[in-house]
Each structure stands twice: as structure tokens, then as C-alpha cells.
Image (tube, rainbow, N blue to C red):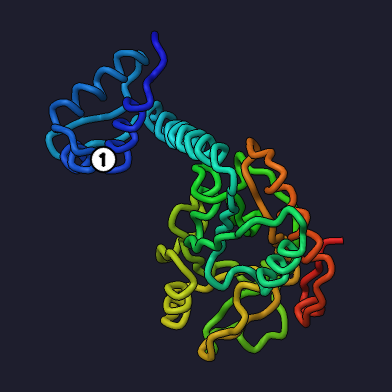
Amino acid sequence: MGDLETREIEYFVAVAEELHFGRAAARLSIAQPALSKAVRRVESRLGVQLLVRSSRHVSLTPAGEALLHHGRHALNAVSAAARAARRAGVTEAHLRLVIKPGGDANLLSGILAAYAHRPDARRVDVLFGGATDRADHVRDGRADLALLYAPFDDLTGLDHRTLFTEGRVAILPRGHRLAAREELRMADLEGETLPRWKGVPDSGSGPEIVDVAQMTQMIMLGRTIAVLPRSTVDPVHPGLVHRPVTDAPPSRMVIAWSQLDHRPLVASFVDAAVSAARTRQDPATHRGVSPVG
């Protein structure tokens, strides 16, 4: 049994994500018969069935699920390696930091200012990602660093430093049965519907959402509630209330980068971020937010 080629993994991942050979072939700009043949060749080489095919339906076997999961990481690693090689050849390399719009907890300006005062500072490009894909930006090389929330964001393959730790709050419609409470416990939320964040397995049983704006609308309609880090909900929409959930596991904002990226300019930015978070004086510090110390 030989190893798989990158192109073969790319072909299989496209089919596994689309669950349709025609759409996957169009996405890859190849003929459908050639794609079908390539996937059967992968199955033959691995000695396992990856897909269950019928005239109208394509589904993944357990082996196919495993190859999809690890294949995505493999493709990300190849892409990241190519980007790293290109960056290494650029004398005046700059840094790319990905954040969620409004998801910097008012830290970003202080971090950039602290970094700019360093003698080795480079230009920093700020990129904006979605609610759940910022870690992927770092893993596949689109960004060098990210501001993430743990344990919400997947830190697989990333190193990180904690910037601050904070409590979580429940976001509720103003007419909700719990809205009049000063604080809540997790037991109070039993039976409530939580949203399903796109790309986050087992995140909830309610409507699928992709960003905070969508979440806000669903909460106002009474379709769901949410439990989020305190800093992500400031300011609060006038149609909603937030209440501290005193026994919810704390959330940490972290600065994260690839475990394979040992460049001094990345380490310098991380040090500046940690220093800026430590020295920040902000009203949030008495609302359940503790800068790292």
C-alpha cells in the first residue's frame, strides 16, 4: 500500500464535503468520470471503502470520516508549508493577525501600540475571520497569529498564551423567564435551547448560526439563548439582557500561533501582546475580567 498523493487527498476531500460527484468535479474543474476513478483508486490503495454510493446519494463510511478529518489537516499543512517557504524568502516579512470583528475585547489597539515600540517591529496586517474559522487561518498559513477564545476555539496544532480570563454571561430576550434574575447558574439553563455554531460539533441543538448578528436575531425571536464570554457582548443589544452565569467554566482570550512557527518576529509580537494585556487598565476588570498576571 503506497502513500496518498496530495492531489488524491484533495479529490477525496472535495467529494466528502460535497457528497456529490458532479458538484465536486465542478469545484475541482475536472471531469466527473476521472474524479470517480481517482476516488476508487484511493479506496483500492487503502484497502477500505470510503464512500457508500447510490444513484441518488453519497455518504461517508467511518473510514471516510477519518480520512476527511485527517485529510483536511494534511492539506492545511501542505498549504502552510508552501506559505512559510515563501515568507522565509521575503526579507521584509510582515505579520498577519486574524481577529473576529468586535472580538478583541478592546485589546487590539494596546497590543499594536506595544508591539510598534519594539525595535524589531514589522508591519501588522489585521485580517477579519468568522466566528469559528480563525484558528484555521493560522493552521493553513493565511495568518500568522490569531486572537481566540478558549475553550470555544479549537487550538489543535497551535501554541498560545493567555491574555486574560473572564466569566461567561447568558444572553436572553428581555421577556425571558430568567431575565429578572441578577445572576444565574448552569442548572437554571437546563432545558434551554442553545445555538449550533457552524463548524463547531456538539455546540448546541438550536438553529445553526455563523455570527453574532445572526445569533442576536435568533435570541430576539425566542428561538435560542446563548452563553458567551462577557467581553463578546459589549455593548448589549437593547432588546436583550445578559446575566452572569456564576458556575460556568471561565473563558480565556489567547494569542495563538502555529506550533511549527518559531520565528523571532512572532515571538516578539506574542510578548508584546501579553505585556499589553497585563498592563491594561479597563473598566472590564471589575466585571469578571482578569488580565493575565
State the residue in front, 205 or 40: 40
Q: Quadrant of the N terminus?
A: top left
Figure check: 175 above or below 192:
below
Q: How crowded is mark 1: few (under 14 residues within 10 Å), some or many (20 or more)?
A: some
Residue 84 image point, x, y percent: 54, 38
Quadrant in which residue 105 is drawn: bottom right
Quadrant in which residue 126 is drawn: bottom right
Figure check: 262 above or below 232:
above
Check disc 1 and report its element: helix, strand or loop. loop
Q: Is residue 37 left or right of residue 149?
A: left
State the residue in front, 208 or 120: 120
The residue that appears at 49% across and 42% down in the rendered structure is 140
- Farthest right residue? 293
Q: In this view, does 127 lie to the left or right of 270?
A: left
- Farthest front residue? 91
Q: What residue did someone put label 1 on? A: 19
The residue that appears at 68% across and 48% down in the rendered structure is 266
How many labels were placed on the picture?
1
Q: What residue type is labelled 1?
A: Leu
